[in-house]
Image (cartoon, rainbow, N blue to C red):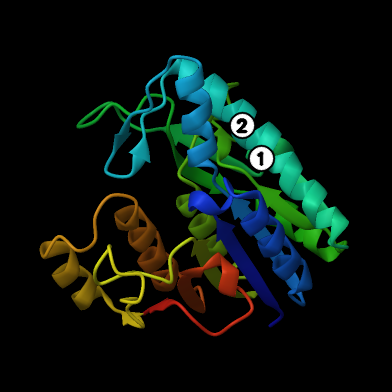
């Protein structure tokens, strides 16, 4: 079965032009078929604050009211997505920038208001794997932002790690898929204040132990939840690593 890499980039890397440029060079150099999923929360939060809108996060997920949705759509699907695509084209990687609404790539349903009202936040309902395969088979790398739709004309904001995991799971029946979640840290840290404390391997038992000790909190919680769901759904490998080491064997392997 042919290999496919699904790579997610986020955190402060996108907010750092030099780090992003270096990452895109490395990503373009990766051989074989690949899909890139990106976040952009830091830039979105900065834009929101400049407009007098205070960003709200609960358990690492953004609360998205109507005004916030307008801003994150412009930032994720516009500014960031097209800059990334332009950077890949510069490096010889033919890419197409997409939201979930394009080609009906990803549909989501609005998350229930209870127990927490996240607003216009979507949980993935379906992924159009033949559409992704169409791009890949024609030598085009899909670049996905965190905006999806509900099929009834409403855009929804979905966690980018969830999108990456969902795409990896959907493509696992067609390809030998590896999922790589990249950010600015070396991996999952035992001590969040010590960048040298990356944990080489995490299984479910260790995850529960670390979570109980309060060592895994905020944005790392949904990241690891999505990683384990991917493994359970047939994704061949999942690694959480530093974006600067995309081409190296490093980071935290999830098993």
Q: Position of residue 58 (x, y in %)?
A: 27, 37
| Direction from residue 192 to residue 23 in the image, left or right | right
- Which residue is painted at 75% across and 60% down in the image? 133
**Picture coordinates of residue 207, whole percent (x, y):** 23, 70
Give the class, few, some or many, for how many residues have Cα within 10 Å of label 1's Cα (few <14, many ≥20).
many
For the point 50% across and 68% down, the residue is 242
- Residue 172 can be seen, yes or no: no
Foreground of the two, 253 or 158:
253
Q: Is residue 163 left or right of residue 88?
A: left
Q: Residues within 10 Å of mark 2 (few under 14, many from 20)?
A: many
Element at label 2: helix
Disc 2 and disc 1: Cα gap in Å?
Answer: 6 Å
Q: Are marks 2 and 1 in contact (CB under 8 Å)?
A: yes
Q: Residue at image x 66%, y 35%? A: 77
On the image, the x and y values in percent for residue 6 come to 61, 65
Pick the residue in front: 82 or 18.
Answer: 18
Residue 193 occupies quadrant: bottom left
In the figure, 118 relative to 232: above or below?
above
Query: How many labels, in total?
Result: 2
Please name the residue that numbered disc 1 is placed on.
80
Q: Which of 86 and 106 is in front in this view?
A: 86
**Residue 152 visible to the viewer:** yes
Q: Is mark 1 on a helix, strand or loop?
A: helix
Q: Which of marks 2 and 1 is nearer the N terminus?
A: 2
* Image quarter (top left, top right, bottom left or bottom right) of the C terminus: bottom left
Determine the image quadrant of residue 53: top left
Q: Report which residue position mark 2 lands on.
A: 75
Judged left or right of residue 105, residue 167 is: left
């Amino acid at each position: 079965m042919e290999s496919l890499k699904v790579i997610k980039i986020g955190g402060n890397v996108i907010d750092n032009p030099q780090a992003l440029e270096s990452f895109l060079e490395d990503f373009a150099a990766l051989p074989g078929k690949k899909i890139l999923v990106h976040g952009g929360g830091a830039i979105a939060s900065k834009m929101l604050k400049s407009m007098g809108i205070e960003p709200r996060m609960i358990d690492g997920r953004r609360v998205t009211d109507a005004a916030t949705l307008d801003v994150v759509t412009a930032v994720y699907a516009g500014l960031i997505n097209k800059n990334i695509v332009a950077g890949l084209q510069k490096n010889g990687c033919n890419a197409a920038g997409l939201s979930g609404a394009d080609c009906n790539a990803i549909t989501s349903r609005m998350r229930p208001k209870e127990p927490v009202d996240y607003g216009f936040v979507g949980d993935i309902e379906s992924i159009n794997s033949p559409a992704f395969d169409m791009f890949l088979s024609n030598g085009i790398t899909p670049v996905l932002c965190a905006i999806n739709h509900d099929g009834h004309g409403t855009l929804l904001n979905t966690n980018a790690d969830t999108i990456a995991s969902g795409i990896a799971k959907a493509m696992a029946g067609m390809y030998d898929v590896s999922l790589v979640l990249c950010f600015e840290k070396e991996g999952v840290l035992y001590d969040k204040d010590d960048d040298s404390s990356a944990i080489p391997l995490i299984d479910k038992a260790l995850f529960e132990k670390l979570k109980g000790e309060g060592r895994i909190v905020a944005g790392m919680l949904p990241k690891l939840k999505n990683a384990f769901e991917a493994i359970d759904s047939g994704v061949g490998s999942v690694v959480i690593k530093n974006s600067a080491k995309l081409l190296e064997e490093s980071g935290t392997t999830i098993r």
